Image (spheres, rainbow, N blue to C red):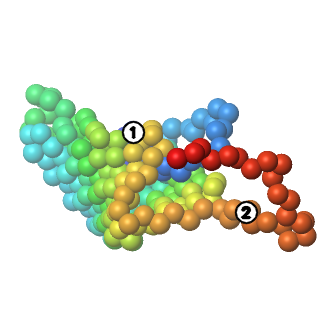
Amino acid sequence: MNRLLLRVSPLFALLTATTFVQAADPKPAAVPVVPTVITSTKMEMWSTDTETRSVFEQNVVVTGTNIKITCDKLDVTATRLDDIKNKDATIGTLEKFKTLVATGNVHIIQGDREVTCGRAEVFPAEDRVVLTEKPVVIDSSGPYVATGTRIVLLRGERRLFGDNIKLQGPPMRDQGPDKDKPMQPPASLPRLPKP
């Protein structure tokens, strides 16, 4: 099994962007920062003068600070540092992640949030995650479940939007009249303005 240790915690922090409205917490406890580790059965990596691309296949598992991702395939593109000494290096020094695309049986767990879909595209520079292929976002703190044909999560905004969204939330209390209490007319009816 291939094992690659990358320091990509800021990239995966984007996936904290589930967006359901929750009760405001007083200061949340700090999550310990740990290195991000990607394991897979197969892996290939190559570089150009400006980018490094890595493709992980079969049994892909990503673990990092407050996150675990599993999928069939993970395609990561990162820009390279402009390092004259290492310009000819097969694998350059990574600077910024441009994209991370997880496909096939994607499952993301982060705290009390869970995502399943067929494809998850992370765009770090845009602080945006796009979920397609039957996405389901579960926030067990609500509990809330969102489904749709495309769901977009924005980092830091706790915002969710997309296409053909269905949101299921906790049950509401019965809003109808109480059968055991007789209906009482209001003390006074509001007067409507004359046309």
> Residue 67, position in %: x, y?
49, 51
> Residue 96, position in %: x, y?
26, 37
**Disc assigned to residue 10:** 1
Looking at the rendered structure, the secondary structure element under dot 2 is loop
Q: Nearer the viewer, residue 23 or 129?
A: 23
The residue under the point 19% across, 51% down is: 53
Determine which quarter of the picture holds residue 141.
bottom right
Judged from this view, the residue extending furthest toward the front is 195
The residue under the point 26% across, 49% down is: 99
Q: Nearer the viewer, residue 76 or 126?
A: 126
> Residue 156, position in %: x, y?
45, 38
The residue under the point 18% across, 46% down is: 52
Looking at the rendered structure, the secondary structure element under dot 1 is helix
Pointer 2 local density, CA inside 10 Å: few below 14, some 14–19, many at least 20: few
The amino acid pointed to by label 2 is Gln
Residue 9 in view of the camera = no
Could you tell me which quadrant the N terminus lies in? bottom left
The nearer-to-camera label among 1 and 2 is: 2
CA separation in Å, label 1 and label 2: 45 Å
Q: Which residue is mark 2?
A: 175
